[in-house]
Amino acid sequence: MSELKSSKAIDRVYQYVKQYIHENALSPSVRDICKGAELKSTSSVHTYLKRLNDLGLIEYRPGMRRAIILKDTIGDSSDEHVSSTTEHTPASVIKLNCIGKITAGQPIYAHEDYSDSIYVNKSLIGSSDAFLLKVQGTSMINAHIMDGDYIIVRKQDHCNEGDIIAALIGDEATVKRYGHMNGLPYLFPENDLYEPIPFHSEGCRILGKVVGLHRYNI
Amino acid sequence: MSELKSSKAIDRVYQYVKQYIHENALSPSVRDICKGAELKSTSSVHTYLKRLNDLGLIEYRPGMRRAIILKDTIGDSSDEHVSSTTEHTPASVIKLNCIGKITAGQPIYAHEDYSDSIYVNKSLIGSSDAFLLKVQGTSMINAHIMDGDYIIVRKQDHCNEGDIIAALIGDEATVKRYGHMNGLPYLFPENDLYEPIPFHSEGCRILGKVVGLHRYNI
DNA sequence: ATGTATGTCAAACACTTGTTCTATTTTTTG
DNA sequence: CAAAAAATAGAACAAGTGTTTGACATACAT
């Protein structure tokens, strides 16, 4: 509609693809995009689609018709003018159930009382599995993780130096920063009142990496 | 794969379409469905697609490639065994779009770059309207609100002593703790490096109360 | 200025894929 | 059991659509 082709062509292509998919729940064809992005050649669109694919903004299946899918950045969307709230949820959202306690024998099992749940963007956890933990205590306060916060843990059995992870020590689950001291692995609380915890004894296990945090009691 | 074609063909077609779309975020072609539903003729599939469309279970654009979209029945689900994660989202979830900047004249308008969005539980904001702000800076670090966090703001024009609120001072939006000093309202940063901001001049306005926080860069 | 990269276009090509037609098999009905 | 209806198959058709090629213009670098 706008007379001026404000931004660059690749940007118009991306915006139009997003808009089209949101409006039609269906990928546009190259020729659809031609019109929408005000480009007169399918070839141009084709070029930009390949580039957007390389950039990781869309996923583009060569040869397949109407086979563009959006690789959502945290949140993305673009839905419009609905004051700022909309219902509807795309398939890119995943529900995580809260897991609360650890018992001796078994690994983790769902908290009985009330199983909280939270919705997070799929892109956050990729193709892995993930779960939710409610933080108890203030041992990570210097990392600005508070008592009562929910942390999103992406399941994995390894991690890098400095990662904040959820781990199992014996039969207790904790959230700590992972690191080494004198060549040995430790879990470091982010609170001067607590001591680093050796992480090289029996029963030490990495549950996953903390990739998100939700707080609702402010 | 299963030897027994358990149910009726039309049912297999519907199930496979659902499965395919869930797995690929993309509509299957008629020939894809042929394989998936163990039918040997595209004609058969075509028949059933038309019928499913009449039944209202799918929406089917004649002529368009890969253009089947699911008309989701209230709470179909059926998804499986993904331990602690499930797709699908009930109506109790609301999508909030991120709002970033404030300009002189107008109140708030959407951030240009990319409008992030987040899904939160409806119960959090009640019947009010709400929006999202991305935190810039560390002025609230003592309240453990970090740079880059997303805060969820429930729109309201009043607040209580001690509430953390989003407010407008002139043409700038800030997140601060609301309180009084010497009988006059102030906005208190939660960072010793910053000074309280008088909140009793022209252009001071409460935008809403901070009711939630999401963090994704940990 | 000259050469190179980049953006854009037009047209042609080839393959995917929706659609249709007719034939054959299976099921239902009377 | 015969006739009718429904289900399925197979093939051919036609349209939609991704892809390629080559050309031209513009911007950028040498």
Image (spheres, coloured by chain):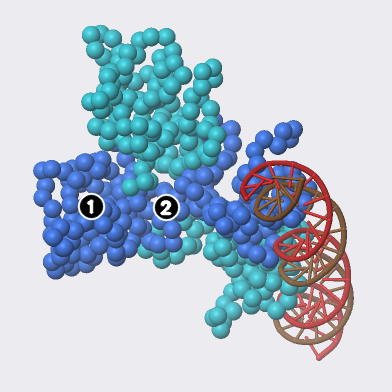
Chain colours: A blue, B cyan, C brown, D red
* Mark 1 crowdedness (10 Å alpha carbons): few <14, some 14-19, many ≥20: many
Relative to B110, is B82 above or below? below
Write the residue at 56% across / 63% down: B24
**Of the residues shown, which amino acid type is indicated by label 2?**
Leu
Residue at mark 2: chain: A
Q: Could you say which quadrant of the image residue B181 lies in? A: top left
The quarter of the picture where the C terminus of chain A appears is top left
Give the residue number, with chain letter if any, for mark 1.
A177
Relative to B182, is B40 above or below? below
User: Dot 2: what SS?
Assistant: helix
From the top left corner, tell me how far across and down residue A193 is, in percent: 10, 43
User: Dot 1: what SS?
Assistant: strand
Give the Cα separation between the discs numbered 2 and 1: 20 Å
In front of the other: D25 or C30? D25
For marks 2 and 1 on the same chain, the one whose residue lies earlier in the sequence: 2
Q: Which mark is residue B61?
A: none
Give the residue number, with chain letter if any, for mark 2.
A124
Write the residue at 43% across / 58% down: A126
From the top left corner, tell me how far across and down residue A201 is, in percent: 13, 66
Left or right: A20 in relation to B108: right
Write the residue at 69% across / 62% down: A65
In front of the other: A61 or D13? A61
The quarter of the picture where the N terminus of chain A appears is top right
Q: Are marks 2 and 1 in contact (CB under 8 Å)?
A: no
